[in-house]
Amino acid sequence: MALPKFDDVTLVFLQFLADGQVHTRAEYFDAIAKHFQLSEVERNAVSKSGMNLFRDRCYWARYYLLRALLVEKVSNGKYRITTRGLELLKEKPTKINAKLLLEKYEEFREFYLKSHAEKSITGTENASPIAIPIMELTPTEQLTQVEETLRQELLEKLREAILKNTPSFFEQLVVRLLEKMGYGIGEITGKSGDGGIDGIIYEDKLGLEKIHIQAKRFENAPVGRPTIQGFVGALVGLGADKGVFITMSHFSQDAANYVKGLKAQRVILIDGEKLLQLMIDHELGVSVDRIIKINKIDNDFFEPDE
């Protein structure tokens, strides 16, 4: 089963506390997981940033319920439903989301609107209508989503900028990238009789260890096995054993399989997607706009499971 949405978790969380007893964090984690029939793999699923998705949704569900005074904290790691929470459950809501909490509870409105810096909305009778968001993503997930959107936009802009430039610019780019990755000092070659070798990385000062590069900016058509075989042939002719083939396109499966089967030569294939990501990782052609540091509470420290 897929992981439940944030607002689905919020409702089940409150329903679990409906017995009026004090429950620990570990207890409601287990209860929510059992309700949604989550496997261990689903419970331990993480985002690209390493965040545990299930625990994050449970945390934000609890936090919003606390802010709406539907749940109270009894002591570290222990929670209980309030009279207000029991009254809400009597109304048999099908979902507890931001719309419901904003409409019903002044305390939640004050918290939510302050955190979203919407100063013009007061929640009073004469106030302008409230813009109602639906809580399908936790704030942490929203941040991750924005980060991924900005990353995709950057990748597209990088791709466009590279393809607008000349093939010789592309050769210089890949050599500079390998330099920034710490492989050594690069040189553009492109000499006749070199079998199509476009650059060399000297891994030591004496030039005893070399990485030969072929850079083909191909945009759409996949790079097939014959092209890679030609590159390997050039390496053999030069007595070289290490090579990197870089393209803005992608490699056919046959080409990838051929490289895997090589014995005497070590050849690395870098397609357009990997190239762009390496440029971002090593800040080539990009600059840091801003750094956002986000701290969070260590719940395991302050609220040990009991």
Image (spheres, rainbow, N blue to C red):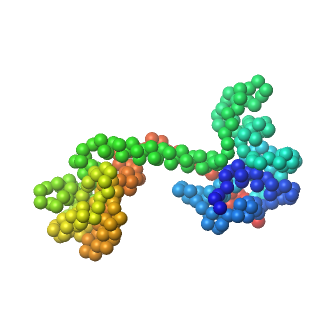
Residue 275 lies in quadrant: bottom left
Using the image as rendered, state which of residue 138 and residue 289 is in the foreground.
Answer: 138
Q: Is residue 68 left or right of residue 237?
A: right
Query: Where is the C terminus found, in terms of image quarters?
Result: bottom right
Quick one: which residue is furthest to the top in this view?
126
Q: Is residue 111 left or right of residue 254?
A: right
Query: Where is the N terminus found, in terms of image quarters?
Result: bottom right
Q: Residue at x 77, y 28 (%)?
A: 124
Q: Is residue 193 left or right of residue 76?
A: left
Percent position of residue 273, x then y: 39, 54
Residue 134 lies in quadrant: top right
Total marks in image: 0
Q: Residue at x 70, y 64 (%)?
A: 37
Percent position of residue 263, x then y: 28, 75
Percent position of residue 177, x then y: 31, 53
Please indicate, yes or no, whether residue 52 appears anywhere in the rendered image: yes
Using the image as rendered, state which of residue 143 and residue 260 is in the foreground.
Answer: 260
Using the image as rendered, state which of residue 14 and residue 78 is in the foreground.
Answer: 14
Using the image as rendered, state which of residue 288 and residue 2 is in the foreground.
Answer: 2
Residue 198 lies in quadrant: bottom left
Q: Is residue 253 above or below residue 130?
A: below
Please indicate, yes or no, whether residue 76 appears anywhere in the rendered image: no
Q: Residue at x 63, y 51 (%)?
A: 296
Q: Is residue 143 above or below residue 305?
A: above
Percent position of residue 234, x then y: 18, 65
Q: Residue at x 79, y 26 (%)?
A: 125
Quick one: which residue is furthest to the bottom in this view?
263
